[in-house]
Amino acid sequence: MNSADVCILIPTLNEAATIGQLIKDFKKDGFSNILVIDGNSRDGTGQIAEAEGARVVMQNGKGKGQAMIQAFELIESPYVVMIDGDGTYLACEAPSLLEPILEDRADHVIGNRLENYSPGAFTKLNIVGNRLINIFFDVAYGVSLKDILSGYRAFTLDSMRELELNKTGFEIETEISVECILKAQRVEEVPITYLPRSEKGATKLNPVKDGFRIGSTIYRLVKVHNPMFYFGIIGSFFVLAGLLTGAFVIIQWSQGITRIPLSVLTALFVIFGLQMFIFGMLSDLIVTLHRQTINLIQEINRQKK
Ligand SMILES: Nc1nc2c(ncn2[C@@H]2O[C@H](COP(=O)(O)OP(=O)(O)O)[C@@H](O)[C@H]2O)c(=O)[nH]1
Ligand SMILES: [Mg+2]
């Protein structure tokens, strides 16, 4: 591999404490094609990056997601490594992320932080939140990925161009992971080191607010992949509510009290809940048939080539 074929993409927002060293490390390892997409930092991040020889582009909107989407349009190198500018990831591990791609085993490689992280790199809340989000993702999408929120990734330009991305904030990694699954890309995970943030720079991620956004993104996007899961959760919620009110109605009835309005409500809950399951089954059918059509089209396209 020619290292000029690899674009190192770094989103930054006020990372003056760490960006210089990170760029130096990449250069030392032979990667000189470095693109910094900066969120109009006010601490001189952009100037430092430029002085170290990176190409610096100011993002024209807000949020890490918007920055990444904008940057993806600018890249022309066949391989891309994306990495946070906060010094929590090691530049020297980029080759191990690229390896599965260069060996043509994968289109998209995720650096898995959760196997080998330094003490203090994650807060307790972060680690619990990360694990829950990954379990939720795996159940919803039927895959076994361990760290879908990782910010250290490698992929091919072609595979990245296939992804349809819209999220502007910290949901971007979630959306990338979902899109890789929806586009049936070959995704592999490689264990990486994860270091604590430097004391000088604080995280921009709010664990509760962004955690909730990430969870709801996983849920909303699953509709077109696994509709039974999507509608099943709504259905279960209503059936459960119906069982609770129903139990109350029966207990009261056995004591000689008849609760007519609550009985009607129980019936509505249960009927609506079951209807959601039927919706789920029908949508599942549509998605399966659609997938077969897409596969067929891809097969025909491949034969044409
Ligand atoms: N361009 C740009 N970069 C951002 C923005 N928000 C965060 N970043 C960068 O994205 C990377 C990850 O953000 P960080 O706060 O470290 O999130 P965490 O790693 O999930 O805690 C860092 O390099 C940030 O500087 C933004 O709005 N615009
Ligand atoms: Mg970070």
Image: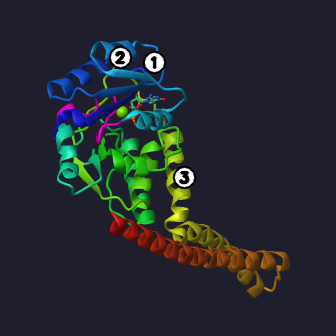
Task: Judge: label 1 CB < 8 Å from ligand 1.
Answer: yes
For label 2, the residue is 16
Work out whether mark 2 precedes mark 1 in sequence or the reverse, and give the earlier one.
2
**Horizontal side of residue 27 vs 82, given as left or right:** left
- Specify how the rendered protein is coloured: rainbow
Q: Is residue 108 above or below residue 262?
A: above
Q: Is residue 210 above or below residue 163?
A: above
Indicate which disc residue 216 carries.
Answer: 3
Q: Amino acid at mark 2?
A: Ala
Residue furthest to the front: 304
Q: Calculate the distance from the C-alpha at mark 1 to the C-alpha at mark 3.
A: 29 Å
Q: Amino acid at mark 3?
A: Ser
Q: Residue 122 magenta-drawn?
A: no
CB contact under 8 Å: marks 2 and 1: yes
Indicate which disc residue 41 carries.
Answer: 1
CB contact under 8 Å: marks 1 and 3: no
Give the magenta range: 76-92
Q: Nearer the viewer, residue 84 or 108?
A: 108
Q: Is residue 104 above or below residue 32?
A: below
